[in-house]
Image (spheres, rainbow, N blue to C red):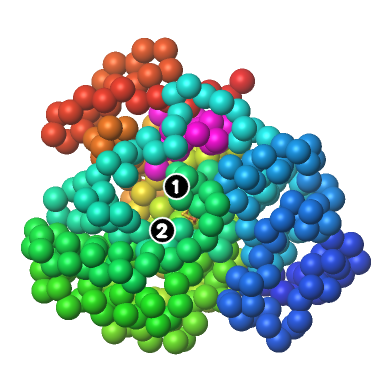
Amino acid sequence: MYRNSVVTNTQNTMNNKNISALWQYMDGKSWRDWRWQMANRIRSVEYLNRLFPDVDEDPEDLDKAVRNFRMSITPFFAALLAEEKPGGVLWKQAIPSAEELREHPELSCDPLSEERDSPIPNLVHRYKDRVLLLTTDRCALYCRHCNRRRRAKNHERDTSAANIAQCIEYIAAHPEIREVILSGGDPLTLTDRKLDDLLTAIKEISSVEIIRICTRMPVVLPYRITRDLCDILEKHHPLFVNIHVNHPAEMTDEMYEACGRLSKCGVPLGSQTVLLKGINDEPEVLQALLRKLLRFRIKPYSLYHGDPVSGTAHFRTTIRKGRLLMRYIAANTSGMALPHYAADAPDGAGKILLLGDHIGELEGDKVTLINSHGMRVQYPDGEDDQ
Ligand code: SF4
């Protein structure tokens, strides 16, 4: 309906030798099995080069980049990459680049001080009424702009049962916590059983009113949204799912179907988009994305300024540019499509809406941001296009 399905396209382009190598690796029956997709992700530079000989990076740089932040690409997403020109908007998000090795004095591994705000490992309690529970450090695809790249450096593992039990105990002991946000890594990489057990344990805490799941699975592995998963989610309402989507080209028929299954079981869908230089920082692209989200029954929720995380300088643009984009969207698009534009400020100052009163002085490449409690923080801005 919105683009050809990945499977159809892949079959039609069997004369393309990259796709052909990918196809050899598939067996038709398993393609839609999310576990098969997880098990057959592209994880080595050698395999990446075999499938995509057009990747124009020095192999040593690629190796270094992957050692800093692991790589993994689902066969589903690889099929999308194979349709795209090298260096396109999907490539940039999935394929490591030497730019990740660029040192930048203002960027760091944990600029949001999540570790500091964790009373116990994997539970971030920064805002009084909600917590962030980091359920795993595994993702189906590691986005090269990820702000939690520090977690997925050397291993992929779920948060241990003992650690989860501590988190549950903490939430139960703090009745001011009304919302639990599951993140990671990607919580939908957990098995159905683990997810169901976790949701059940959270719902048993009477002070918790809602659960929010943050995921990129409908984009990078839509087959994860199975009927069984939907049956589980349906048991734990009110439960919201926020989907990380950055470009309209990521939004496939398969994603449309996955979102339809979630909507059908009563899950309200929202989006999280990261403002990324060269990917979605043009007014028409951002507008097309926001409109397409609504057609997929996803309410645009947030547009985040790229966090000042080491290895992501090449994706960061300026707040000035972000505000111009928002002005264009507000003037030319339905209010339904309008996300809030925010930055996550350093020193635990939290999310700050990038609107009038929250923006102070601009000095060189630093902007002063002012949070809702009046706290002023110096924010390292991104770079304008050359
Ligand atoms: S899905 Fe989220 S946590 Fe995983 S790599 Fe992408 S941005 Fe990071």
Q: Quadrant of the C terminus?
A: top right
Q: In this view, does 17 lie to the left or right of 184?
A: right
**196 above or below 242?**
below
Q: In this view, does 54 lie to the left or right of 122?
A: right
Residue 319 located within the stretch drawn in magenta? yes
Secondary structure of the residue carrying tag 1 is: loop
**75 above or below 368?**
below
Q: Quadrant of residue 366?
A: top left
Q: Residues within 10 Å of mark 2 (few under 14, many from 20)?
A: many
The residue pinned by badge 2 equals: 184
In the image, the segment drawn in magenta is 304-321
Q: Contact (CB < 8 A) between labels 2 and 1?
A: yes
Q: Is residue 237 shown to the viewer in this render?
A: no
**Three-letter code for the amino acid on which mark 2 is drawn:** Gly
Q: How far apart are marks 2 and 1 (CA)?
A: 8 Å
Is the CB atom of the residue marked by disc 2 within 8 angstroms of ligand 1's nearest atom?
yes
Residue 307 located within the stretch drawn in magenta? yes
The residue pinned by badge 1 equals: 148
**Three-letter code for the amino acid on which mark 1 is drawn:** Arg
**101 above or below 271?**
above
Q: Position of residue 87 (x, y in %)?
A: 72, 43
Of all residues, the one furthest to the front in this rendering is: 162
Q: Position of residue 185 (x, y in %)?
A: 45, 58
Is the CB atom of the residue marked by disc 1 within 8 angstroms of ligand 1's nearest atom?
yes
Give the residue displayed 44% in from the left and 47% down from the top.
148
Secondary structure of the residue carrying tag 2 is: loop
